[in-house]
Amino acid sequence: MLIHAIIMAAFVWCLTSVGPMWLKWSLHQGAPLIAGLINGIILGDIAYGLTFGATVMMVFMGVAVIGGAIPSDTCLAGYVGVTVSMMAGVDPSMGVTVSATLGALGAAARPLLMTLNSFWVHRADKYAAEGNTKAMARIDVWGPVALCFVLYFIPSFIVIYFGAPVLDAIMAVIPDWLLTGMGVVGKLLPALGLAMLMQLLFKRSLIPFFIFGFVMSAYLGLGIIPIAITGAGFALMHYMYNAKKGAN
Amino acid sequence: MANEVMQETAAVNSENNENTIKLQKKDLISSWFKWICFGQTCYNYERMQGTGFCHSMLPIIERLYPKKEDRAAAMQRHMSYYNTENNWGAAVGGIVASMEEQRANGADIDDDAINGIKTSLMGPLAGIGDTVTQSLVKTIFLSIGCSLALSGNVLGPILFFIGMTAYALGVSYNAYFLAYRNGKTSITKLLRSGVVKNVSEALGALGMMVLGAMVAANIGVTTPLSFTIGGSEIVLQTILDSILPQMLSLIIFFVTYRLVVKGKKPTYIIIGMFVVGILGSVLSILG
């Protein structure tokens, strides 16, 4: 439990600071999905982890990080929210609530981090004036690492380590009718993530493709891979058609 | 005239003249890799990715400027405000590396020229990058990953991880080296041509199709309502399914979409869903 909490808090610590940018696209922005798998492995129940991670991820899917303005911290929702809920062994729909709450609270740390990081910039300015390349590289990396230890690692660890038993105790006193209701809520919540995605993608000319996808899944019962491959075919066709139209 | 010739032939010169300094492949790879690793490590309100960009230029500076005061000047030059998209924005690093190389070999490129390139390209590249990476590529990989994971397939998260990682490394590497070799013109040409717009449209088509499939497969709300008319029991869900499978999911999706488009806060929508879900379950309307 102690090591489990340390591992997950360390994920948050690295991904908010030194974690390579090329890994952040999956590990940070897809945090709930990845955290579900990792927790599933640690807890010895991969199927639970997969369902859990994907359910939470669906809600967060529309949360795009355009221009650095994050309405909710996906990283904390994943590595802290999913971990706490899975440790307590709750239903994925309950996990969504826990994750969304922690994600929203955690988003408050972001402006603080970006303000405080300016401190290292002034140190870097000094090294730049001296032409000291080694010190410059050092401050650019280790400054934020130190800051995120305080700002992210410690709070994450505390929430995971002390939060799981609390959540467990809460779950024990929740009546059955509420649990059943939560199950329905869990089915409704993905609609939010998908609606936010639609908002990002929406263009009049793309409506037909939505219909194709829906029909292929609802009537034909095809899985996501064949639909995505067909979609790639349509995308190619759409591209060639548009390119030709542009050339004329 | 002299300047133009010098700029154009800087690369040729460096092979003929032993006094010139040429960037080596490993410097460029190191510069690209430092950008794609640490570009946003010290993200801050004052300069955004400013220190990250300077960090990525260090291998270039170390190679080109052996003298301490030149190094200091170059480092200070790259500490300015900078903010772009991680992957596509790597192109700016490539262009600046080639400009620094020419400058170190005597070409007349001043600080303003370098800063001008940075500020004029970071915005448009961020625009493209945010659209293509965030709302298209990420969406598609994430949708596939989530759908597979929901059906209990461990490949879901793994495919998502591999896909996004390959995309980030592949796009940034190619952007950096394309821009280093072909300079500013290659990027402005790409920005001006309709290619990027058409590619986004095409990826949008794929995204919408996956989205349609997910609406059908991953909401899955049903109703347990049934009526007894004239002695025979009629199950509402069976009737709905015979008209349009997943009709309830589609309705719920469009209601939510309307709320999102109207600008309702996600937090309120979540609260609303809790009320509707729990009430619906208690009253046996939804299941």
Image (cartoon, helix red, strand yellow):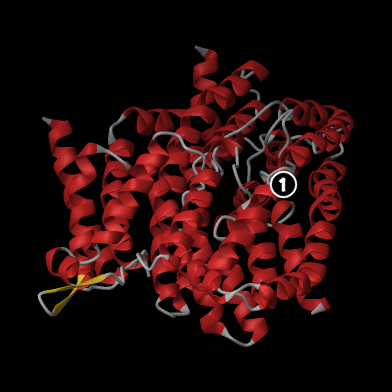
- Can you see residue A238? yes
Residue at the image position 55 percent from the left and 43 percent from the top: A65
Residue at the image position 87 percent from the left and 38 percent from the top: A132
Quadrant including the C terminus of chain B: bottom left
Q: Can you give x and y, in whole percent of width and height, for residue A174 in the image?
A: 64, 72
Q: Can you give x and y, in whole percent of width and height, for residue B246 in the image?
A: 25, 65
Residue in the foreground of this view, choosing between B63 and A215: A215
Q: Is residue A193 above or below residue B233?
A: above
**In terms of image quadrants, where is residue A45?**
bottom right
- Can you see residue B170? no
Residue at the image position 88 percent from the left and 34 percent from the top: A123
**In terms of image quadrants, where is residue A24?**
bottom right
Q: Is residue B255 left or right of residue A115?
A: left
Chain under numbered label 1 = B
Q: Can you give x and y, in whole percent of width and height, for residue A137 in the image?
A: 80, 45
Q: Amino acid at mark 1?
A: Thr
Residue in the foreground of this view, choosing between A35 and A242: A35
Residue at the image position 49 percent from the left and 75 percent from the top: A51
Q: Is residue B70 left or right of residue B60?
A: right
Q: Can you give x and y, in whole percent of width and height, for residue B282 in the image?
A: 45, 67
**Extreme-front residue of the structure:** B230
In the rendered picture of this protein, how many numbered marks are placed on residues?
A: 1
Residue in the foreground of this view, choosing between A161 and B102: A161
Under tag 1, what secondary structure?
A: loop
Q: Is residue A78 above or below residue A244?
A: below
Q: Is residue A91 above or below residue A148?
A: below
Q: Is residue A28 left or right of residue A242?
A: right
Residue beneath label 1, please? B41
**Extreme-top residue of the structure:** B1
Residue in the foreground of this view, choosing between B15 and A145: A145
The 10 Å Cα crowd at callout 1, few under 14, some 14 to 19, many 20 or more, is: many
